[in-house]
Amino acid sequence: MPSPEPEIKNHIRRLRFDHGEMTQDQLAKQAGVTRHTIMALEAGKYFPSLLLAFRIARVFGAPVEQVFEYHATELNL
Amino acid sequence: MSDSEKWAWWTLGVVVLTIASYGAYVAFVKSGHAGLVFGLLALAALPVSRRRYFPNRYFDERERAIASKAALVGFYAFWLAFAALINAIGLIKGWNAILTVPVWTLIETLCWALILVLGVQSLTTLVLYRKGPHA
């Protein structure tokens, strides 16, 4: 049965490694959050605000849709 | 472990210590006001008063979201307990009963309410840090 919650996936972990194996701490400092928040984002335990999503995308120099991916479910488009 | 989790563990410890001390006082001392042990709750203010805890400490959006949710759950618990207490008094004493309560009892009730709010708030904080504020 599909989940009623919309799923937002991200590619932060891959992008960090693509950017010279950037550490979570480095990304956290550049995005203005704590390392724990980056860990929670990578683990899919936290969906960021639009502002934080744009900040993270800016750190990677990528559009936000390359960092975050929205998976619409049947119940929640 | 984040600062907020450290705060939650500390607060939970203070709550457990206070409840245990109250139980021990009632069980073994039996004289004077057991409510004096509620002074231990002042320890809950220690992390806030520490100089290195708040100055220059930036709480990001996830930490703020968790703190808000935890506070909300704490106060929900308080209102539930308050409504349950009032209804229980009404059911036991009768809806037209007039209560004469010593001020000391009111203060103790207030302390128990604080214990409830702090306990639920810190537990919720710990759970949300493990599951995320969207859990």
Image (cartoon, coloured by chain):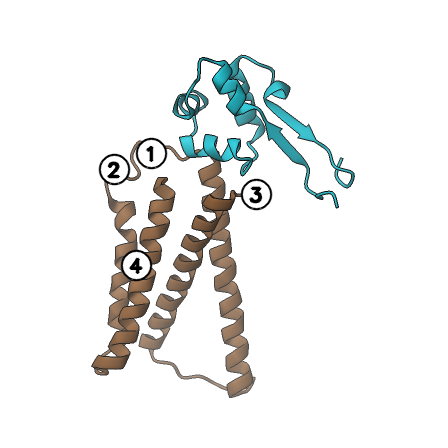
Chain colours: A cyan, B brown
Left or right: A6, with B45 as reference point: right
User: Residue A30 in the image: x percent, y percent?
Assistant: 43, 20
- Single out the mark in the foreground, 1 or 4: 4
**Separation (CA) of disc 2 from disc 1:** 8 Å
Tell me the kind of residue under disc 2. Arg
Mark 4 and mark 2, same subunit?
Answer: yes
Which residue is at 50% across, 62% downward?
B77
Question: Do the residues at discs 1 and 4 belong to one chain?
Answer: yes
User: Which residue reaches farthest right?
Assistant: A74
In the drawing, does residue B19 fall left or right of residue B95? left
Identify the subunit bearing mark 3: B
Determine contact: label 2, label 1, CB under 8 Å.
yes
| Amino acid at pointer 4 | Val
Is residue A34 among the parts visible in the rendering?
no
Of badges 2 and 3, nearer the viewer stands 3
Residue indicated by mark 2: B52
**Residue occupying the point 47% across, 50% down:** B127
Is B46 rendered above or below residue B96? above
Residue B57 numbered mark, or none: 1
**Mark 4 or mark 2, which has the lower sequence index?**
4
Residue A28 image point, x, y percent: 42, 25
Q: Chain of mark 1?
A: B
Quadrant (top left/top right/bottom left/bottom right) for the N terminus of chain B? top left
Binning the other alpha carbons within 10 Å of mark 3 as few (below 14), some (14 to 19) or many (20 upward) gives few
Q: Secondary structure at mark 2?
A: loop
Residue at the spot of label 4 = B14
Looking at the rendered structure, whether the residues under marks 1 and 3 are on a common chain is answered as: yes
Considering the numbered disc 4 on the image, is that residue within a helix, a strand or a loop? helix
